[in-house]
Amino acid sequence: MSTTHTQTAVATAAEPDYLSCSKGWKSWLLTLDHKRIGVMYLIAISASFFLGGLFALALRLELFHPGKDFVDGDGYNQLFTLHGAVMVFLFIIPGIPAALGNFVLPLMLGAKDVAFPRMNLASFWLWLFGAIFFVFVLASGGLDTGWTFYTPYSVEAQTAVIFAATGAFILGFSSIFTGINFIVTIHKMRPAGMTWFRMPLFLWGMYATAIIQVLATPVLGITLLLLIFERVTGAGIFDPHNGGDPILFQHFFWFYSHPAVYIMILPAMAIVSELVSVFSRKPIFGYKMIAYSSVAIALLGFLVWGHHMFTSGQSKLAGAIFSALTFSVSIPSAIKVFNWLATLYKGSISLATPMLYALAFIFLFLIGGLTGLFLGTLSTDVHLHDTYFIVAHFHYVMVGGTLFAFLGGLHYWWPKMFGRMYSARGSAIACLVSFVGFNVAFFPMFPLGAKGMPRRYWYYLEEDFISYHQLATVGTVLLGCGLLGIVVVLLKSLKNGERAPANPWGAATMEWEAASPPIHHNFHHTPAVHDPYDFGDLRFDPAQGGYARTSNATATATH
Amino acid sequence: MTIANQVAAPPHVEEHAAPRAPFIAEHFEGAEHQFESGKLGMWIFLVTEILFFSGMFCAYAVYRSQHPEIFSYASQFLDSTMGGINTVVLICSSLTAAWSVRCAQLGQRKGLILTLALTILGAFGFLGIKYVEYSHKFHDGLLPGKYYHVQSEAVADVGLDASIPAATEGESHEAAPEPAHDSGHAPVEGPEPANVKIFFGIYFAMTGVHGLHVIIGIGVYVWLLVRAIKGHFRPDYYGPVDFTALYWHLVDLIWIFLFPLLYLIH
Amino acid sequence: MSHEEHAAGGAHVMSPKVLLGIWGALIFLTALTVWSAQHDLGRIDLVVAMGIATIKASLVALYFMHLRYDKGFHGVVIIGALVFVFLFVSMVLLDRNQYQADIDARTIELEAR
């Protein structure tokens, strides 16, 4: 009712944007607007990220010298556990889908909102509720089981395992709600004319992610519930002292947590697919293959969980099967990389900050992905398992991959979210510092691990290891500086950044047809569906400082 | 039956021209769009439920395949009569839930209120019987893990009726509190196998989580009942009734598997 | 009955006959599974019980849950979920059956001490 009213009466008059259309904390915390929920998620996960980052910094500082600097073994165990748990459960899993995805997904569909706005808000509230449990954990004895909660130690540990497991359980619900919402939104809210294969690839990535969230997360839920049950009653399902089976726990855990790795990386790939095309001003190469490979990664990701258990008592047969299946995931991953490279080829590349992150992603993901092959191979994994090699590998994928793509997406959509341009030079420098810092921090860990330094040790004796550790610590500090620089640049833009045009990058997806920042209902008129990667009729308009379509005709190109 | 008269569904709501019905959220195109979206959402939620329970079925399968002796020994302590009655109760409640959807679709308000109330009644019946069963288990010390301390009279009890068809087990449990007359009976299944408590861990985990779903179902059905009494549902708006029924059928489905897996082990 | 009832939007309405028929079948199958459990069927014991349960589950899904008249995609969704459950349970069972021998050997070793 109100929409028809707005469309006719106020048509083009300056309608307040979603940030200023209503005021007061209630208008935020009780909002059903996907954009505001996305922004709240963005603030919340960023805060968690910096908390997790502080733990990481503390870890690295402790490791600067062998021997005790300021924490002992117990303190160190807590630090790496809390670093892992906060980063995984509070930051990286909700990260891109809940913060950026929530904001962008309905806009990309030309829709007013996600299919279930209340459930979307509930998802955020559950996130907060789960986060409160993690605060309890910090306040009540910490957690030292590792983020994986392996039994039997998690049954015996004197730390706040039950709080942490409950928190992760609740966060799982939050993730499931996002997943259900995105699947239904993509199925049911696409505008007329946007067929599956005319969707932006970001939506394909979100869809594939949502499949995993829906299929895998419940298994984590029951695993944590049974773990709590085991701790309270000693039921004997996972605890060998009571006749239980700790390897069963690992199967349960990794049935979720391996696919969860793809909850982390698929949205990152989805962002990069957008960035590479827009900043090469060239249609994405191999659209269908990228789309299919997202879904393929989501499904194949369920077949390989046993590669986390090669050295933990899993049978040789299962190990061999899982090792063989693990390689299958590399096929769709490589397809994506080749397609991005082919898109760059002969493109008219603009090195705007989002593109810098996209290029950093491709480089870092390549290293992360290729070192994964060593770990997926049964025989080499036996040597490398639980060493710093694996720490380096998954940080290259999660930080080099997910974090850098997240930052790329953030810089890409920042003008849309807040209506301000940030300093191009400042953000490029911050990106570069982060990139260098990241590599200095994590690349030394490959040789360190190959030489035999085990992960999760607070102490190391051999003089061989010290130079690597010190280099890594220096890199971590540098990375921290880069990240702080990003925060400064972005926050500064809110205060005195230039007003952003509707389409600063010349992208062809629908969110750029909305104002920057968008109005409460996103669009004055539902925009026409165009080919998301056809930049032909987008021209730079100096009057606006951004791009505009030269024709308003409905796009005719098809894939 | 008067149903034939009610066949004629009201004319389809006019799509755009007419003012929108108040129950349609503004980001949907119309009633059907909203209903279809909600339904897909519910089915996907059911997927998460299936995978949630699959963890426990997996644990069950692992232990039963490796330790069948624990299962065949311990399941004698479960009361298959009560389990059977509860299966029937839940099936009846599933029937009324399915019927409530029919009533809502046809706009039969009284029928809707009645079937919703009957569904809630069935749910309470199920929980009541479950409560009786649980209190027997607590009394007999048939509990998970460290709380497992089986009482000798409970063992004797099972020994007593192991030779009698399973259907009469229920009566013998009623006799359990009187330990006077069971002195002559020894358990026929031989000595207790190791780690019987694992069975009770799995039993309480599975039936407990299932019971929790029943409780949640009651909550939702009470909400539906209130809305039905207020007359919120109409033939072009009955999504919540339909979706909740789907959930309720799934809870029934899970029990359909739990019953033979836990109670009917030879 | 040739004239099927339809609600607004073309949704299928279950006739009382079908509802009661399915209910009756479910009750009968419950009785059957209890009855079969009282007879020693040997190794096919579990197969029979699970077979009956699966039939019951299919009846509930197809009729009470309207899956038979519903969009095909909803069926695909549920079948898909079951495929993943199968994958999960079967891989874990396969592995456990393989390493059970290690557990047994260790148990014997511990008992010998």
Image (cartoon, coloured by chain):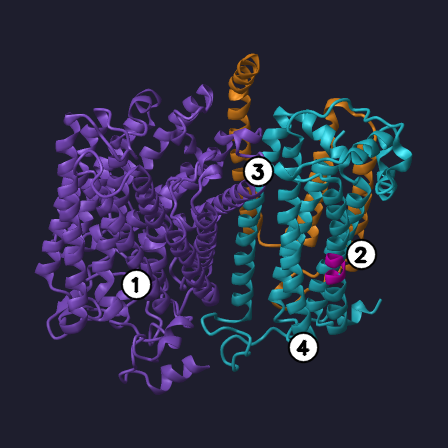
In depth, the one of A189 and B134 nearer the eye is B134
Tag 3: amino acid: Gly
Residue holding disc 2: C17
Residue holding disc 4: B231
In the picture provided, is B208 more to the left or to the right than C105? right
Tag 1: amino acid: Ile
* Magenta span contains residue A201: no
In depth, the one of B128 and A82 nearer the eye is A82
Chain letter for the part of the structure drawn in orange: C
Chain name for mark 3 = A
Labelled pair 1, 4 in contact (Cβ < 8 Å)? no
- Answer few, some or many: residues within 10 Å of disc 2's Cα (few below 14, many 20 plus, some between 14 and 19): few
Labelled pair 2, 1 in contact (Cβ < 8 Å)? no
Tell me the CA gap for discs 3 and 1. 40 Å
Q: Secondary structure at mark 3?
A: loop
Q: Secondary structure at mark 2?
A: helix
* Magenta span contains residue B120: yes
Residue holding disc 3: A234
Tag 4: amino acid: Gly
Labelled pair 3, 1 in contact (Cβ < 8 Å)? no
In depth, the one of A394 and A266 nearer the eye is A394
Residue holding disc 1: A43
Q: How far across and down, in percent of the image, does residue B227 sit? A: 65, 73
Q: Are marks 2 and 1 on the same chain?
A: no
Tag 2: amino acid: Lys
Q: Which shade is chain A?
A: purple
Tell me the CA gap for discs 2 and 1. 56 Å
Q: Which residues are magenta?
A: B119-124
- Answer few, some or many: residues within 10 Å of disc 1's Cα (few below 14, many 20 plus, some between 14 and 19): few
Chain name for mark 1 = A
